[in-house]
Amino acid sequence: MAAVKTLPTEVSKVGAEGTIKLFGRWETQDVECKDISLTDYIQIRHAVYLPHTAGRYAKKQFKKSQMPIVERLVDSLMMKGRNNGKKLMAVRIVAHAFEIIHLLTDQNPIQVLVDAVVNTGPREDSTRIGSQGTVRRQAVDVSPLRRVNQAVALLTIGTRESAFRNVKSVAECLADELINAAKGSSNSYAIKGVRIKARKGAVKAQAKHEPSVFRDQLYKQLEHVQSGDFEGYTKELVAAGGTLEYLKYADTLFEILIVGGLLQPGGSFLDEAAKSPFSIANVPEPVQVEEVRKYVEVFNKLIRRYKYLQRPLEESSLPTLMQYMHRWPPGQTEKVAIATGLMISQGLASAGCLQSLTKDNIVKDGKSLAFSLSSHIPIVVLAEQSMEHLSGLLKKGGIKDLLLFFPTPKRTADNLLAHFKDAGLPQISEWYTKKQSSALKNQLIAKLKEMCENEEPHESIIAAIREHQTALPEAELVQVIWQGLMASVDWSARADQIEGLALREVTKYAPIIEPFCNTGKSQVALINVVQVYCYDDTRIIKAFPQILKVLYNKDCVSDQAIIYWFQKGAKPQGKQHFLKASEPLVKFLQSQEDESEEEEE
């Protein structure tokens, strides 16, 4: 194939001129950087025909400072959006923008670009100094490389945002951005900066808080509803949530809906304004639970529609209002107490809201006790739920000790039991007694475990048990003793040694158990607790007959107790297995009993 002897006209023309021009038009010889600190980071010294050098600038750190500034602009245009990855399209956009810049300013577009980068690169910034709670902001200088990086990024971001949903092309928007930035005009996105979106918390803190205005607007929504039309109140309150800021004025809303108006610190009403058309304070007297339930149902429907209102109700509004109840007349206290009980029962609020009633200034005069634990809240909850459910509600609400609601001189178990019996709530007295008994058992188990681990003498352990002997029934006491003694045993031995270990430990602790097994009931209870213990720990399940034999030999259980347990006293846990395993021992005891009867005859 013959070699080409003539070059294309455009190539021949460029070669004849002897200079390299960007896009065949723009020279870089006369372009200058007015900021001496950026001279090494705005690359204009090495001219190129196209901003497409395919250089390996990303291979080494800080190498991109040697990339031609026009190519950096092209690459930045490709970073996101519809032009992502289309290098030739971005090159054409920049070429078109340079033509527009030249027509509008009669200047070299490369010079305009350099001036724009110099003007828009930030010179100062702030950084975080310190950590955790001691953080502060410190002003720092921005490095030249970062100045150029941010300048190019801001120029392209501004171009992209101005071109979005605009009849102007991207090239026209880029030209406008570069021209305005080069002149330092505030019309440039890169010059005026980015509007920083404030955090929601900061906006909320700075916003004007006008509860009186909110109250008046809410009254307008409710004033045309007829008294007693609860469906109408529900409809208007739900509709008002679309225009009023319920989340911002949640506490104000519940003050209005519960006590009928705005309160100032201390609990007195803020002004002499009219009371709310709808509030729990409007319940007619004498107070009936079913009447209060109609009002609470409005709360229920409102919170189901605006779920975000539930948290401020139980964490802020109710606890705050309860602190002011010493200023309320008895009728209003009863209304709010019944409403609170219904809300707790229906899950609109947790029992944790009652914790504000344990403060000394409220507890000392008995107001707290009258509100929380008298015939109001418990009766309302127990009318719809069981005692177990009420216990779960108290536990979930973090209420661990009911005595905290009593005045300090009356914080005794006897006063608590008498109070609930007088209030017609014996189930709470029974529940509290069981709870105290369970706590006492756990305390004794922990104490026995500690004493056994410290290898204290048997006499000391028996004396410690006798201190609690009167507080627990004999059958329960034996079960607690067994659990406490076995809790101190280290069961980490090999599998083939576990049974021998169990027999040695039972033999060791049998003298401690024996003084408390004086009746048949306590002996059968001991056999049952051993059965359940072996059932739970399958490693020693085969040792049950031997354990039973050791207890028999150590006089902890009698032959009559073993036979009774075998015939009709065994627990259902693994019953058939344990009966079959202990059958030889029982037959032996029965034969011994028959022989003794024959000898007596």
Image: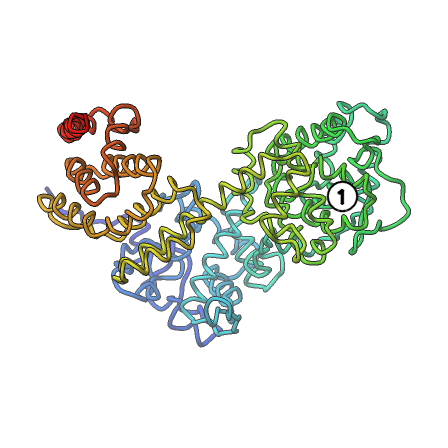
Q: In which quarter of the image is the C terminus?
A: top left
Q: Residue furthest bottom?
A: 36
Q: In which quarter of the image is residue 46?
A: bottom left
Q: Which residue sits at x=80%, y=23%?
A: 229
Q: In which quarter of the image is the N terminus?
A: top left
Q: Which residue sits at x=66%, y=33%?
A: 379
Residue pointed to by mark 1: 255
- The answer to whether one can see residue 19 in this image is no
Which residue is more in the foreground, 8 or 532?
A: 532
Which residue is more in the foreground, 430 or 37?
A: 430
Q: In the rendered view, tell whether residue 559 sits above or below residue 369.
A: above
Image coordinates of residue 73 in percent, x first then y, are 42, 56
Local SS, label 1: helix
- The answer to whether one can see residue 223 in this image is yes
Q: Which residue sits at x=48%, y=59%?
A: 109
Q: In this view, does 417 lie to the left or right of 547?
A: right
Q: Is residue 304 left or right of residue 572?
A: right
Amino acid type at circle 1 is Glu
Image coordinates of residue 197 in percent, x first then y, are 58, 53
Q: Is residue 413 left or right of residue 57?
A: right
Image coordinates of residue 355 in percent, x first then y, are 62, 49
Q: Is residue 145 left or right of residue 253?
A: left
Q: In the rendered view, tell whether residue 202 sits above or below residue 147.
A: above
Q: In the rendered view, tell whether residue 61 sits above or below residue 102.
A: below
The way the protein has been coloured in the rendering is rainbow
